[in-house]
Image (cartoon, rainbow, N blue to C red):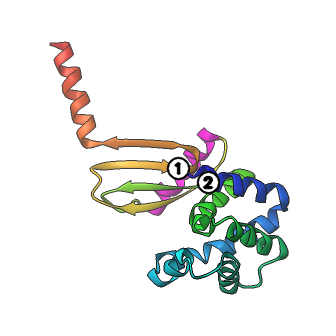
Amino acid sequence: MSVIAKKYVKALVESVDEKSLVLAYESLKNLIPAFNNKKFNNILSSSDVTSLKKGEFILSLLKNPDVKLTNFIKLLSKNGRLNEIPTITKELKNQIAKLNNQFDGVVISNFEVNQSDMIDLEKSISKKLNTTIKLENKVSDYPGIKVEVESLGVEVSFSKDRLKAQMAEHILKTL
């Protein structure tokens, strides 16, 4: 996470209430797909477009931004930090999660985890971490199962390969 993004988010968190913070997050989140557009990025990086016009351009993409968000975008524009919006948005999501003590995580496995097991896993992890965790299953080629809650820095994994290696090591020690 960018130090710059953290500073801007900290300033935003300190200057608005929680409702405004959530609205700002929702507005900024809707901008994220634009950052994958080459023409959009060309506009933001162009030296032919003033920072004021870049800020106005971003604001034109937002639906009814409040005064605080408008000023925030203008500040980012003035300081040449509009390219930080995706990182700022991610950090803003983390800060809102901390305020509400609710975090998102992912269960990575090579199979679909059934809904009742997901709920049990959410309850178990939530109880262990004294917070509320909402998990999403992501099927991949991971040889085992891994649970990640990135914003809390939590990762738990059970890998077939690691289990085999530990069993072999244990057997060799007993011989």
| Residue 93: assigned label | none
Q: Secondary structure at mark 1?
A: strand
**Is 174 or 57 nearer to us in this picture?**
57
N-terminal of the two: label 2 or label 1?
2
Find the magenta span and give its range: 114-129
From the viewer's perspective, tell me whether residue 90 is left or right of residue 13.
left
**Percent coordinates x, y for residue 68 in the rendering:** 82, 70
Q: Is residue 90 above or below residue 6?
A: below
Mark drawn on residue 149: 1
For disc 1, the neighbor class at 10 Å (few under 14, some 14 to 19, many from 20) is some
Left or right: residue 134 versus residue 131 is left
Q: Residue at x 74, y 67 (%)?
A: 75
Q: How many angstroms separate mark 2 from mark 1 (CA)?
A: 7 Å
Disc 2 and disc 1 in contact, CB within 8 angstroms: yes
Secondary structure character of the magenta stretch overall: helix
Q: Amino acid at mark 2?
A: Phe
- Quadrant for the C terminus in the image: top left
Identify the residue position indicated by label 2 in the image: 103
* Residue 92, position as x, y percentages in the image: 67, 60
**Residue 127 colored in magenta in the image:** yes
Q: What percent of the width, then of the height, locates residue 106?
A: 47, 56
The local secondary structure at tag 2 comes to strand
> Residue at 30% of width from left, 42% of height from top?
159
